[in-house]
Amino acid sequence: MPNNRRRLVGRVISNKMQKTVVVAIERRKLHPVYKKVVGSTKKVMAHDESDAIMIGALVRIVESRPLSKNKRWAVEQVIEEFEGELGTTQTVQDELREMTGETEQEGEDDSN
């Protein structure tokens, strides 16, 4: 018989603590009056026994007994590993250039 603990899916945003990760859980719902999609993010601390989960990984966390002052969740499964580089930020213009196949040198020639 499966247990009835709550299970949530979120993305790891910090793994600097020992055997603990911080998971951001994003919720999106329709506003009842304005009919606009409103997003909210909640950060929770989760226990990571392996201490091997990297930042950016998509994980499923499960409710557990209190493990510390702030830790009430445990990582149940890593759904998707993060494959990009950390610390690199792209602007929207850079992403559009990549999608269309343009290079940065073409844009520089027009400015001179």
Image (spheres, rainbow, N blue to C red):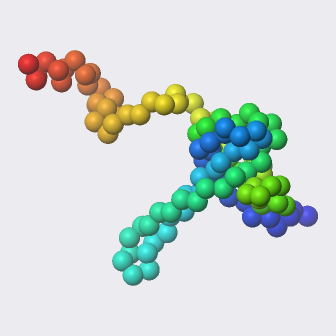
Q: Is residue 73 visible?
A: no
Q: Residue at x 69, y 45 (%)?
A: 21
Left or right of residue 10, residue 35 in this image: left
Q: Residue at x 65, y 35 (%)?
A: 54
Q: In which quadrant will I find the C terminus?
A: top left
State the residue lying farthest toward the bottom.
33
Residue 64: image quadrant is bottom right
Q: Nearer the viewer, residue 69 or 1?
A: 69
Q: In which quadrant will I find the N terminus?
A: bottom right
Q: Nearer the viewer, residue 98 or 48?
A: 48
Q: Is residue 45 visible?
A: yes
Q: Residue at x 50, y 63 (%)?
A: 40
Q: Residue at x 33, y 29 (%)?
A: 98
Instruction: Answer above or below: position of 4 versus 89.
Output: below
State the residue lying farthest toward the left.
112
Residue 26: image quadrant is bottom right
- Provide residue 37's location: percent of width, then percent of height: 42, 67
Q: Nearer the viewer, residue 101 or 106?
A: 106
Q: Nearer the viewer, residue 46 or 97?
A: 46
Left or right of residue 98, residue 10 in this image: right
- Provide residue 24's location: percent of width, then percent of height: 59, 52
Left or right of residue 13, residue 96 in this image: left
State the residue lying farthest toward the front.
69
Left or right of residue 48, residue 105 in this image: left
- Provide residue 41's location: percent of width, then percent of height: 54, 59
> Tag count in the figure?
0
